[in-house]
Image (tube, rainbow, N blue to C red):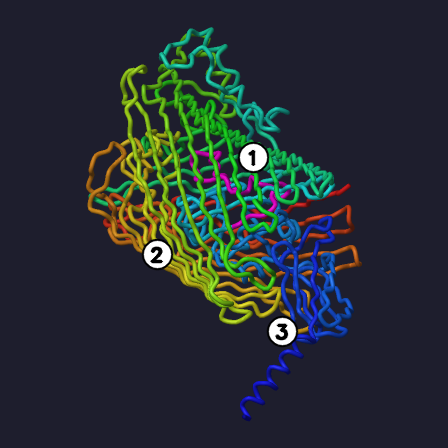
């Protein structure tokens, strides 16, 4: 009886409690983005634990007791808004609220499913909510931190470091292990010597957000072991016109003695448009016949010569124009466009030792022993046009971007050549232009199949055309006597090379269907998700590598910078002639393809568990056609590599508390070689060294696992620690082979590698230490890694033959992997007035010693030694129109050093083990931006 009365009392109490409730619901929008919806904003009753978050469409619903309450609307990086609300029993109050950015902007939060992700909003919140192990950085954060390009910005992410001209290393692994997407679509590299486009070519003005995947999910390509970068180009959500100009000075580089190629010292040369003047002369035809030119033909054939101009290097400069416009149309539709044009240049001088070593039974001897000075003038030009249309359930965007890069350099190598050891003043002068042109056009679309948006399809297509050229790469050598050189024509002297890699076609596509299903969460959104789709690409590349040499002539003496005068006398007199000396191997063709279907499912189990699992079936092909040293019209010989991969992936997230998660990820991937690593080409350098591709390389198979714990003590702070492991079968590595004419760099499947490591990062508001430090925050991340390679007894060489390994060490670290790296930054944010805000960042990074090239023929490995980098950036937004950035780059100015190790199999006789060293100088730059 007592139990019956107790149950009746509890029922009555709960009924009265339920009837004493009301509901507050509505939509949260972003005032700074023309009131676009603001996902995942927080809504709470002040002074209580009652609250909720808006869904991905900015909508929320909060059950509250009847009565008067103060509702707090907030979001990371935005001013919180309080509003007093009276709710009657059983009533639903509709309250829509627009939030604006706070004056002190906080760490980035990027929401994967939101169209406009450029706003610096919610990076920490996305880390907390997402099931994937992924980090992102947005355009607003890049701009606020004074970051000029994507590559520099990515170094703020755990496990990523920038390594000079060799690009981004992820978890200590070099460029070969990375992959790049633009707007979710695969794109080629602009340089056959690199796996992906150098990310410093993407100025922040044309980038909306960059996602970094360090673990595999089925919807991204299986070709990576380090990281996949997905660049979402800016969509131009507001009407804006911005003009940017900049100037830079680098110690020992700017306003210093400099040598220019004669064709560079002109207006065309300044903007990087001299490539056409250096093309293969038409007299030689499109197909080699190896003609010998007459004296008159020799004089008329070439528009540029061997001369160099001496002067002072100017300051580095940059200029950019950004214009975007938005049009609001009927039925809540809108159209936006964005146009961006950017140009920058730089003058660099590099001076240091440049040595090779030769292994013999008696010991290790000196090969080349030069002091090398390089005067390099670089230009980067970019243009982007983005067109975007969006309405409630449909959106479509078109993106076209063009990238052009040039490097024109004069290089002097002075010292002892391996092929001329008795001459202590042997000089090699190289005059070279590297030029790349890159055009990509893309179309992306997304359509929601119903009103509640729980089903959608998306797709895209991308077409790219690329060209990489080294037109008229020329050099001469001889004995240096003061400012003169004693030399002669003939052999490899006064040789001209014409190297072209044309990406005639690169097409990629994407199609995906996604459906949400299952029970609804508090925001009314279905909790589970299923996706199925296709993505793939196909490319066709053609190479041409031709030579023009001179017939033997008499010895002559000439000024080093004005050698053409004496050289041309011999041409005019008929003492020697130009003739083509190409062989039938001058041309090769490469077709590369990938076609994949994938399926994945995301499941929620209660409030704690999320599981995302799936599989990708990817068919890959690499088809090479080449000729032996035969007739120019001989049939091409094929080398085919085809394989189908079944690549499973799983990610699990467990919410330990509201502020802490544990994540686990596992998956299988593969690694393709870089283009130049597989082309059957021997690329010859002036000093006798060469780089030889290996068309018989096979892809590496990678098995990956990650475990991570993360804690979010506040909205602006985070701490995470994780472990990871990888098994790489048939690892691709850079190695040296001995050769009578000079060392050959080549690439081999050397064996199986294992690596495992630990990552840790945190962002700490120093107000925890003292209220006087409330405007300071400290970010830190580090990676520690151990690797091991068990070298095979035999390998397949570049001729397709089985050879015994000549590696010095059969058990060693993985080539290109650092055992540790550290990145840290200290940020200070303050304001002079309400509109004049400032942000100062001190950024430090360092990586551990790593193998640059595997040691062979009794010689130890060549190691890349640690380099510390310290930068200071001061960004100042004076008002809504004008902002300034001051920066000091590479403040410590350490030497970049490559050194042969001390574990050689025989005695090392040279006095120094240093292969190469140089300093970059300390850079200072000023940029001004005016927004109309």
Q: CA distance from mark 3 to mark 1?
A: 50 Å
Give the percent coordinates (x, y) of residue 763: 57, 64
> Can the viewer see residue 506 in this picture?
yes
The reply to whether discs 3 and 1 touch (Cβ–Cβ < 8 Å) is no
Reading the image, the residue beneath label 3 is 769
Camera-nearest label, 3 or 1: 1
Q: Could you tell whether 804 is left or right of 698 in the image?
A: left
Given residues 826 and 59, the one toward you in this image is 59
Secondary element at tag 2: strand
Q: Residues within 10 Å of mark 3 (few under 14, many from 20)?
A: few
User: Quick one: quadrant of the C terminus?
Assistant: top right
Q: Image height check: is 659 above or below 868?
A: below
Instruction: Give the numbered dot on residue 443.
Output: 1
Magenta span: 184-211
Label 2 close to label 3 by CB (< 8 Å): no
Residue 755 is marked as 2
Q: Residue sitting at 27 percent across and 18 percent down?
A: 630
Viewer-side label of 2, 3: 2
Query: What's the residue at 33%, 38% (across, down)?
Result: 745
Q: Earlier in the sequence, mark 2 or mark 1?
A: 1
């Amino acid at each position: 009886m007592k139990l019956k009365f107790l149950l009746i009392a509890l029922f009555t109490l709960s009924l009265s409690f339920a009837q004493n409730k009301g509901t507050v619901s509505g939509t949260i929008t972003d005032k700074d983005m023309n009131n676009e919806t603001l996902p995942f904003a927080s809504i709470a009753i002040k002074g209580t634990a009652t609250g909720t978050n808006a869904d991905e469409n900015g909508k929320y619903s909060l059950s509250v007791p009847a009565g008067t309450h103060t509702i707090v609307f907030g979001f990371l990086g935005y001013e919180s808004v309080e509003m007093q609300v009276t709710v009657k029993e059983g009533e639903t109050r509709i309250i829509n609220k627009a939030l604006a950015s706070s004056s002190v902007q906080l760490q980035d939060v990027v929401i994967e499913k939101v169209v406009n992700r450029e706003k610096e909003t919610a990076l920490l919140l996305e880390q907390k909510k997402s099931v994937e192990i992924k980090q992102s950085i947005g355009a607003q954060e890049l701009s606020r931190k004074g970051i000029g390009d994507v590559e520099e910005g990515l170094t703020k992410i755990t496990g990523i470091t920038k390594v000079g001209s060799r690009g981004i290393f992820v978890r200590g692994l070099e460029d070969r292990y990375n992959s790049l997407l633009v707007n979710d679509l695969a794109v080629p590299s602009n340089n056959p010597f690199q796996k992906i486009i150098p990310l410093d070519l993407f100025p922040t003005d044309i980038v909306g957000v960059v996602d970094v995947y360090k673990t595999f999910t089925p919807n991204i390509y299986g070709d990576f072991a380090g990281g996949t970068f997905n660049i979402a180009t800016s969509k131009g959500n507001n009407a804006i016109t911005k003009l940017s100009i900049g100037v830079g000075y680098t110690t020992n580089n700017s306003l210093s003695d400099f040598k220019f190629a004669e064709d560079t010292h002109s207006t065309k040369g300044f903007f990087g448009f001299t490539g056409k003047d250096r093309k293969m002369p038409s007299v030689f035809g499109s197909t080699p016949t190896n003609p010998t030119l007459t004296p008159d033909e020799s004089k008329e054939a070439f528009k540029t010569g061997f001369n160099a101009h001496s002067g002072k290097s100017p300051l580095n400069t940059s200029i950019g124009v950004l214009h975007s416009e938005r049009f609001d149309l009927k039925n809540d539709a809108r159209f936006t466009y964005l146009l961006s044009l950017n140009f920058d240049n730089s003058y660099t001088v590099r001076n240091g030792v440049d040595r090779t070593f030769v292994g013999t039974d008696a010991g290790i001897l000196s090969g080349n022993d030069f002091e090398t000075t390089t005067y390099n003038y670089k230009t980067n030009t970019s243009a982007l046009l983005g067109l975007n249309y969006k309405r409630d359930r449909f959106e479509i965007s078109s993106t076209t971007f063009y990238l052009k890069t040039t490097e024109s350099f004069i290089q002097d190598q002075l010292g002892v050549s391996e092929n001329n050891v008795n001459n202590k003043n042997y000089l090699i002068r190289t005059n070279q232009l590297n030029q790349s042109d890159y055009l990509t056009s893309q179309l992306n679309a997304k359509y929601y199949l119903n009103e509640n948006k729980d089903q959608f399809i998306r797709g895209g297509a991308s077409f790219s055309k690329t060209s990489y050229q080294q037109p008229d790469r020329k050099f001469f050598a001889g004995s240096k006597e003061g400012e003169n050189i004693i030399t002669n024509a003939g052999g490899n002297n006064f040789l001209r090379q014409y190297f072209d890699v044309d990406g005639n076609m690169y097409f990629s596509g994407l199609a995906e269907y996604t459906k949400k299903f299952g029970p609804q969460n508090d925001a009314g959104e279905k909790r589970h998700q299923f996706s199925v789709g296709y993505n793939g690409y196909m490319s066709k590349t053609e190479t041409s590598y031709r030579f023009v040499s001179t017939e033997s002539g008499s010895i002559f003496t000439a000024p080093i910078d004005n050698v053409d005068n004496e050289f041309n006398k011999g041409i005019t007199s008929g003492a020697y002639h130009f003739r083509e000396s190409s062989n039938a191997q001058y041309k090769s063709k490469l077709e590369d393809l990938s076609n994949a279907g994938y399926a994945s499912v995301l499941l929620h189990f209660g409030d704690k568990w999320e599981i995302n699992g799936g599989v990708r079936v990817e068919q890959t092909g690499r088809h090479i056609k080449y000729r032996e040293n035969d007739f120019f019209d001989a049939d091409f010989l094929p080398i085919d590599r085809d394989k189908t991969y079944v690549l499973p992936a799983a990610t699990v997230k467990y919410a330990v508390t509201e502020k802490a998660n544990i994540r686990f990820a596992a998956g299988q991937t593969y690694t393709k070689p870089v283009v130049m690593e597989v082309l059957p080409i021997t690329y010859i350098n002036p000093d006798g060294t060469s780089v030889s591709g290996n068309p018989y390389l096979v892809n590496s198979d990678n098995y990956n696992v990650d475990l991570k714990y993360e804690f979010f003590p506040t909205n602006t702070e985070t701490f995470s620690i994780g472990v990871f492991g990888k098994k790489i079968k048939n690892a691709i590595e850079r190695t040296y082979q001995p050769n009578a004419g000079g060392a050959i760099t080549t690439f081999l499947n050397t064996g199986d590698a294992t690596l495992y490591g630990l990552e840790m990062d945190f962002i700490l508001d120093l107000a925890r230490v003292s209220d006087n430090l409330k405007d300071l925050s400290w970010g830190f991340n580090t990676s520690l890694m151990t690797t091991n390679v068990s070298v095979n007894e035999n390998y397949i060489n570049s001729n397709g033959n089985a050879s015994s390994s000549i590696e010095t060490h059969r058990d060693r670290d993985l080539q290109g992997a650092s055992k540790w790296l550290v990145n840290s930054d200290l940020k200070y944010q303050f304001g002079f007035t309400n509109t004049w805000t400032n942000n100062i960042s001190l950024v430090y990074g360092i990586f551990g010693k790593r193998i640059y090239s595997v040691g062979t023929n009794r010689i130890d490995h060549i190691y890349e030694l640690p380099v510390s980098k310290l930068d200071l950036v001061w960004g100042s937004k004076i008002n809504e129109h004008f902002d300034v950035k001051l920066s000091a780059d590479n403040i410590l100015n350490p030497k970049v050093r490559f050194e042969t190790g001390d574990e050689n199999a025989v005695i090392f006789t040279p006095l120094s083990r240093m292969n190469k060293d140089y300093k970059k100088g300390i850079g200072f730059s000023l940029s001004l931006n005016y927004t109309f």
